[in-house]
Image (cartoon, rainbow, N blue to C red):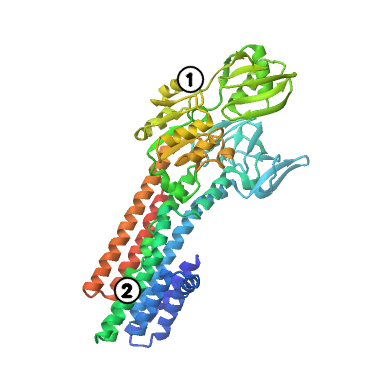
Amino acid sequence: MLPEVRWAVVSTVFFLAALGVQLAGGPAEWLYAGCYLAGGWAPLRDGLLALRDKTLDVDLLMVVAAVGAAAIGQVLDGGLLIIIFATSGALEAVATRRTADSVRGLLDLAGDHVTRLTAEGAEVVDTASLAVKDVVLVRPGERIGADGEVVEGASEVDQASITGEPLPVPKSAGDEVFAGTLNGTGALHVRVTRAASDTVIARIVAMVEEASATKAKTQLFVEKIEQRYSVGVVLATLALFFGPLAFGADLRPTLLRAMTFMIVASPCAVVLATMPPLLSAIANAGRHGVLVKSAVVMEQLGTTTRVAFDKTGTLTEGAPQVVEADDEVLRLAAAAEYASEHPLGRAIVSAAQERRLEVSSAQEFSAVPGVGVRAIVEGRQVFVGRGPTVYVDDVEVGTITLTDRLRDDAHAAVAALAEFEPVLLTGDGEDAARKIAAEVGITDVRAGLFPQDKVSAVRELGERVMLVGDGINDAPALAAAHVGVAVGRVDLALETADAVVVRNELSTIPAVIALSRRARRLVLANLALAGTFIVGLVLWDLLGTLPLPLGVIGHEGSTALVALNGLRLLRKSAWT
């Protein structure tokens, strides 16, 4: 049980016992004292610590109001304030814990133990003790304990927890598997490729926890005005107390009205209006394989006005194939591209290997993103440029024709984002770019762009542009965009984008935008609800006679309602 929940329960028990004794005509002072201490010590501590840092915390206002009510004989009303405030704090703590647990629970999917294969045989070890290159046995029906590569066996694996794929995926030697996914009917030998702390699931958890520690712009604005507002509440409370007394008003009703005002005017609900919806949205997106790096990004996603796509590795699978090339040109290009990590380079090398061409070693390899690669091959300088066109000692010797397959979900994703007037930004030639754009339904095409040109194009499109890329040669543009979203290569994209689509499916992009919009609507609804309660209760207290218990219930009830409202985005139905 959380400490906040435990103390709220203890405080409530004392209050109910005191109320029963009081109604029976017995002495209930010590029971009320227990209620005040159990429910009020933590807010008092937090308030005093904040005061030491020269900030005024709403917790301190609540404790002062409760003590003030007790000082004028309203012990029951003060106790009611304490238990409702403590219960509200407990609900907030539960909400925060639930948001964290919903994502951290993913780590449990990998299990605590795995079967490691060694030269001496099989042994059961802790998952956390696995090292890269260890080989583990995954029996039928077991969860895979580490990210790795299948080295023996064949099966089908349910990857829904990572990639969101609805059907099990066939796996055999050479295929990648992820920790936490469920093995089917076959046995697999899996070589570990990532340490336990570096698995996709672990990264999702770490990224979401890091994002949860950030604050959105709306939250920062609320916190900025909270201090001034809280000071204003204190000054207004003092004026409501000393002003009437100066004109001969009675002490007890004057203090009671001032304490009621302090309670109902406190901005507790406003403070809680922003972060619960955004943090819940971050957690929900994380469960569906979309890493949103901060609350700021989650808020910005919903303000997107234009969406731009990279082509290779984004709208297409990024696994091009050579369809036409002279053997000698292909051999030289493969030698120069051998050390390259670009999809085009890998395709050229694979094609040369398939043709069983003799590929020489290259020296002095260098690559310029968006331009090409250069190396010394057999004493000659070979440059593979855009096209790709191959030059030997600055003389063009030929071109290589490649084709890339469109992603299966590209057309549907672009259609779902039609309201954002999708744009294609690519370094490819005009003809190839327009061919792909026509297939997915994009009419605005910017082709032949270098990485720096993509940055300029993003800025020309407006201030709220989302760029979707693979993080390979569009990192500067991802950074320049209002929101940069990376798909495909998780390792590289984690460092370059604001959000990462781990499941490698474009369909999650409209889904996370819709989730962000819903979170923003909830934030605005929460702020409106909190403001309405505060204004209504304050006017009632100033223009009429607001009973302290009703003021307490109205104020703390609105705070609890706002906190719980934000948790709605943790539900599965919130992800469309």
Q: Is residue 344 above or below residue 532?
A: above
Camera-side residue: 522 or 394? 394
Residue that extends furthest to the left in the rendered view of this protein: 544
Q: Is residue 11 above or below residue 470?
A: below
Q: Can residue 194 be seen here?
A: yes
Q: Amino acid at mark 1?
A: Ala
Secondary structure beneath dot 1 equals: helix
User: In the image, is 165 to the left or to the right of 556?
Assistant: right
Camera-side residue: 37 or 10? 37
Camera-side residue: 457 or 182? 457
Q: Is residue 365 above or below residue 544?
A: above
Secondary structure beneath dot 2 equals: helix
Residue at image position (38%, 65%) is: 268
- Sequence order check: which comes first, mark 1 or mark 2? 2
- Residue 25, how many percent across, how many down? 33, 87
Q: Can residue 505 be seen here?
A: no
Kindly indicate whether the residue at mark 2 contacts the one at mark 1 (C-beta within 8 angstroms): no
Camera-side residue: 335 or 560? 335
Residue at mark 1: 432
Which quadrant of the structure image shows residue 80?
A: bottom left
- Residue 429, how many percent across, how many down? 50, 21
Which quadrant of the structure image shows residue 148?
A: top right
Q: Is residue 382 above or below residue 208?
A: above
Residue at mark 2: 236
Q: Amino acid at mark 2?
A: Ala
Residue that extends furthest to the front in the rendered view of this protein: 394
Quadrant of image for the C terminus? top left
Residue at image position (65%, 31%) is: 153
Between the C-alphas of marks 1 and 2, the distance is 68 Å
- Residue 181, how many percent across, how many down? 56, 41
User: In front: mark 1 or mark 2?
Assistant: 2
